[in-house]
Image (spheres, coloured by chain):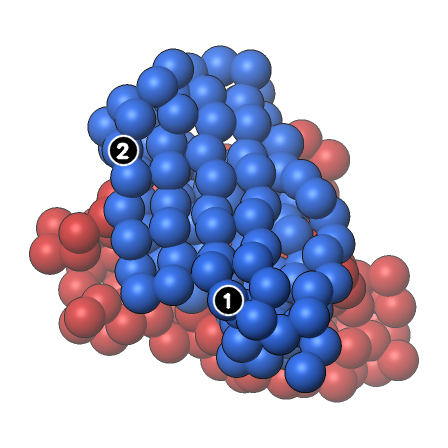
Chain colours: A red, B blue
Amino acid sequence: GAVVSQHPSRVICKSGTSVKIECRSLDFQATTMFWYRQFPKQSLMLMATSNEGSKATYEQGVEKDKFLINHASLTLSTLTVTSAHPEDSSFYICSASGDYRLPTSGYTFGSGTRLTVV
Amino acid sequence: GQQVMQIPQYQHVQEGEDFTTYCNSSTTLSNIQWYKQRPGGHPVFLIQLVKSGEVKKQKRLTFQFGEAKKNSSLHITATQTTDVGTYFCAAWNSGNTPLVFGKGTRLSVIA
C-alpha cells in the first residue's frame, strides 16, 4: 500500500533555532500534501495544504513566515518551523493524497514528528 | 467551513462492554472516514463510508453512515484492551481537499 515516510520522528531544539520536517511519499506521487498539528489529547488541526510546484495554502491563524512549506517534487514536502519557541512544541503530521490505488480518497499519514522546543 | 462534531470526548468501559462514538455534521457529507490513533502514534485509516445508509463491519467494529449523510457512528462490540486509543471521524468534500477531523473520542478499556 501507499507509504508516507516522515522524518524525524522526534526532535528537540533550542528556542530560536529552526527545524525542518520531511514528508516523503515512497511508492506513489503525492500531488497534494497536508500538514497537521496536534496538541496533546486534542484533534488534528490542519495547518496548510501544499501542492507540488506551487505555494502552499495556509489555514487562518497559521503564520506562513513561521511555518515554511516547500513541495518541490511529487514525492517530497518539507515543513520548516523557523525561530522555534516553546509554544511551537507539538506533534506535526503530514498526509498525502494522489495514489489512485487506494480504496479511499487517498489519504495516507506519516508517522508524525514530535517537536520539543526548550 | 465544513465541521464535524464528535461525541463523547471520553469513554471508559470495562473490557467486554460495548462502545459507540458518534459524528455529526450540519451539512451533507460526501463521505466520512474513521481513523484510530493509539497513544503516541499517528492516525491509522479504518474505513470510508460513501453511500447513504451504508453499514460496514470489520470484525467487532460496525460503521454506519446516516440516511441523510449527516451523521455516522462507530460501534465496537465486546471491547478489548487492544481497542484503546482515540477514534476520529473525518470528512472531506472532493478532489485533493483536506480532511476535516472531529475532535475524537478517547477510549479507555479497563481489564
Q: Earlier in the sequence, mark 2 or mark 1?
A: 2
Which element type, helix, strand or loop, lies under badge 2? loop
Between B70 and A83, the residue placed more toward the observer is B70
Q: In the picture, residue B52 is in which quadrant?
A: top left
Q: Nearer the viewer, mark 2 or mark 1?
A: 1
Q: Helix, strand, or loop for circle 1?
A: loop
Horizontal relation, residue B1 to residue A34: left or right = right
Label disc, if present, on residue B63 of the rendered structure:
none
Under mark 2, the amino acid is: Glu
What quarter of the picture does the N terminus of chain A occupy? bottom left
Disc 1 crowd, CA 10 A, few/some/many (<14, 14-19, 20+): some
x and y, in percent, of residue B67 in the image = 35, 19
Residue that badge 1 annotates: B78
Hey, what amino acid is under mark 1?
Answer: Ala
* Looking at the image, residue B80 lies above or below residue A74: below
Q: Is residue B74 visible?
A: yes
B54 up-or-down from B43: above or below: above
In this view, B8 is above or below B31: below
Q: Which quadrant holds the C terminus of chain A?
A: bottom right
- Kindly identify which chain the residue marked by label 1 belongs to: B
Q: Residues within 10 Å of mark 2 (few under 14, many from 20)?
A: some
* Percent coordinates x, y for residue A74 in the rendering: 24, 58
Label annotation for residue B54: 2
- Residue appearing at x 63%, y 32% in the figure: B5
Residue B55: % across, % down: 29, 39
Q: Quadrant of residue B16?
A: bottom right
